[in-house]
Amino acid sequence: MSDARLPFQQLVLASGNAGKLKELQAMLGEQVTVLPQSQFVAEEAVEDGLSFVENAIIKARHACRASGLPALADDSGIAVDALAGAPGIYSARYAGTGGDAANNAKLLQALEGLPPEQRGARFISALVLMMHAEDPTPIICEGVWHGSILHSARGEHGFGYDPLFWVPEANCSSAELSPAEKNRLSHRGKAMAQLRVRLGLA
Amino acid sequence: MSDARLPFQQLVLASGNAGKLKELQAMLGEQVTVLPQSQFVAEEAVEDGLSFVENAIIKARHACRASGLPALADDSGIAVDALAGAPGIYSARYAGTGGDAANNAKLLQALEGLPPEQRGARFISALVLMMHAEDPTPIICEGVWHGSILHSARGEHGFGYDPLFWVPEANCSSAELSPAEKNRLSHRGKAMAQLRVRLGLA
């Protein structure tokens, strides 16, 4: 445990995703309380950026404005080689508003008939921490996790595309990893590890 | 010299600043030809971001759109402690359209009467490299250079606030450094060194 004194004790997570809140609180440790933006934000931000980092900035700024607190946002998604990087920044809404099940079904269909060696994919995470809405130097940390898309879902943990994401270094799907194992290996875990270093926590 | 094969041989520098073009070409080496955006861009981008990185993204995207080539943008400025971080992202237009001389004069006036220990400042650079205008994962590299603001201009090299920026580790102003020395120490030099690593050039 580091003795670093952070410039804040609370921060708002600019996300409505309970899975992300849990992951991020676990990775940041007890020194910081991660508050869900639902306590402050009436309407979610319009994520109209063209890159992960822009969408993370948009979300963090929106949460700063609503709460008056520092805010952390993650924008993440999956880029599939055979789909020229799709669904990418549109991962959460790949199949419209149908959620994880519909997104996963659409992805399986898009890759139907492709053998394992043509199913390469990577998870990407951009984390942005802003002290206030006009912070001129937000902290930006990015992580990438390389793997491939399975032919069917495996595992019960995680969320999003986790059940379809084969993790070569662990020989299982991302949804078969325990939360701690996933945090150690994942795109978001790598970005969070960088953030911990930037904050003097690691 | 690295043997890395870059995914491009030319890139557009999203800047009209001849000083930056010279610095960046020197730092990138011979493997890449840095083209000035004036060859492609009729009107400069509107830099209405609230952070250095957002302005760099805006400029890089504008140059990508105009040229059809990868583009590199730098947004940089100086943040003065006694001015609560001003002029910050507004450094280039601190004194309106008067350019370097007017900006430097305004900064000296703003700090008039302050002793050296209250004149701390830092140069900040955000570099963004985009492969195309909708690149979902632009490469972002940032650098910071700590120093302080002199009571009067010194030196003939560099541009912008260089004559007023005291460099403690070199015991001279930034404008008294040779271009090579400045590239080794400066905010932009540090960001470029990261970019070279990210591109496999270093």
Image (cartoon, coloured by chain):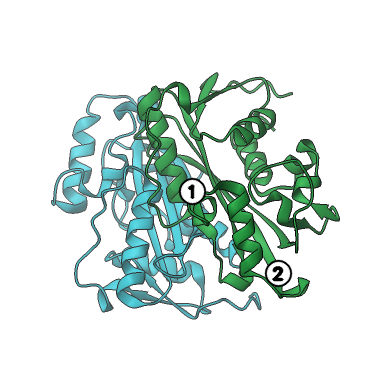
Chain colours: A green, B cyan
- Residue at which label 1 appears: A97
Q: Nearer the viewer, residue B4 or B83?
A: B4
Tell me the residue at 32%/42% (across/down): B50
Question: Residue A101: x percent and y percent?
Answer: 63, 50
Question: Residue B132: x percent and y percent?
Answer: 43, 70
Q: Nearer the viewer, residue B107 or B36?
A: B36
Tell me the residue at 45%/39% (across/down): A138
Q: Examine the rendered structure and indicate whether residue A63 appears above or below residue A139.
A: above
Question: Residue A201: x percent and y percent?
Answer: 66, 29
Tell me the residue at 56%/71% (across/down): A84
Report, in whole angstroms, how far the alpha carbon at label 1 lies from the one at label 2: 25 Å
> Which of the image's four quarters has the N terminus of chain B?
bottom right
Going by the picture, which residue comes out furthest to the right? A171
> Which of the image's four quarters has the C terminus of chain B?
bottom right
Is residue A167 shown left or right of residue A40? right
Which of the numbered marks, if any, corresponds to residue A61?
none
- Residue at which label 2 appears: A119
Is residue B56 shown left or right of residue A52? left
Tell me the residue at 64%/37% (across/down): A197
Q: Earlier in the sequence, mark 1 or mark 2?
A: 1
Identified by mark 1, the residue type is: Thr
Identified by mark 2, the residue type is: Arg
